[in-house]
Image (spheres, rainbow, N blue to C red):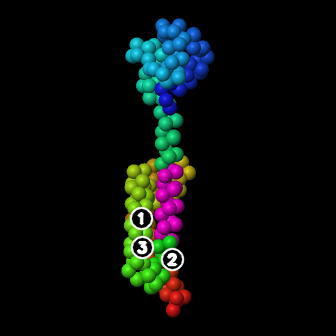
Amino acid sequence: MDFSKQIKKYRLEAKLSQDELAEKVFVTRQTISNWENDKNYPDIHSLLLLSSVFDISLDTLVKGDLDEMKEQIKMEDIKKLNRDSIVYSVLLLVMIVSAVPLFLYLDFIGVAIYAVMFGITMYYAWSIEKQKKVHDIQTYKEITAFMEGNHLDEIQKYRESGKRPYQKVALAICAGLITLAVCAAMMYLLS
């Protein structure tokens, strides 16, 4: 939240007009208007008086509503993880389905196209893993809770952390089996 919006927000919450606030902090109404319109900023003395009039800490006045800012950041993180997950899933599906046709019909050009797709897919996989590490989410339950904007309690978190090694192995085996099945089906259909 901008500092100018902060001043106006707290002034309105205190049910003060610009003239009344100006009188309390020993400035003109025009000065309050300039602060609220982001034309200039109060000096340190005025900041101290504003925090006193609004009955908030100087930190809160200057930094803004920290909870609102944290929530905004959290929503951006959720959207980014969701977007990257969708892109990764689509790319992975395209790679699985296009592997055999690219290699059989386009020779070296097909290998080059596949290598580029592989690089892009791995970039998104790396991005997702980085986000998961930042937010300390690995298991399906942790990821779904994060995507819904929730947090697991300590007991649930501890249980989920015990599942992490087994889920990674199971996921790798399942991915390999699915890829093998799709390649076998493609070879059967193309022969």
**In this view, the mark in front (1 or 3):** 3
Rendering coords of residue 20 (x, y %): 57, 10
The magenta span reads 78-93
When the figure is inspected, residue 161 is found, relative to residue 94, above or below; the finding is: above
Which element type, helix, strand or loop, lies under badge 1?
helix
**Circle 2: residue type:** Val
Residue at 38% x, 74% y is 112
**Circle 1: residue type:** Ile
Tell whether label 3 touches label 1 (CB within 8 Å).
no
Mark 1 = which residue? 120
**Circle 3: residue type:** Ile
Residue at 44% x, 82% y is 106
Rendering coords of residue 25 (x, y %): 48, 10
- Give the class, few, some or many, for how many residues have Cα within 10 Å of label 1's Cα (few <14, many ≥20): some
Mostly what secondary structure, the magenta segment?
helix
Rendering coords of residue 158 (x, y %): 43, 54
In the picture, the disc for residue 97 is 2
Which element type, helix, strand or loop, lies under badge 3?
helix
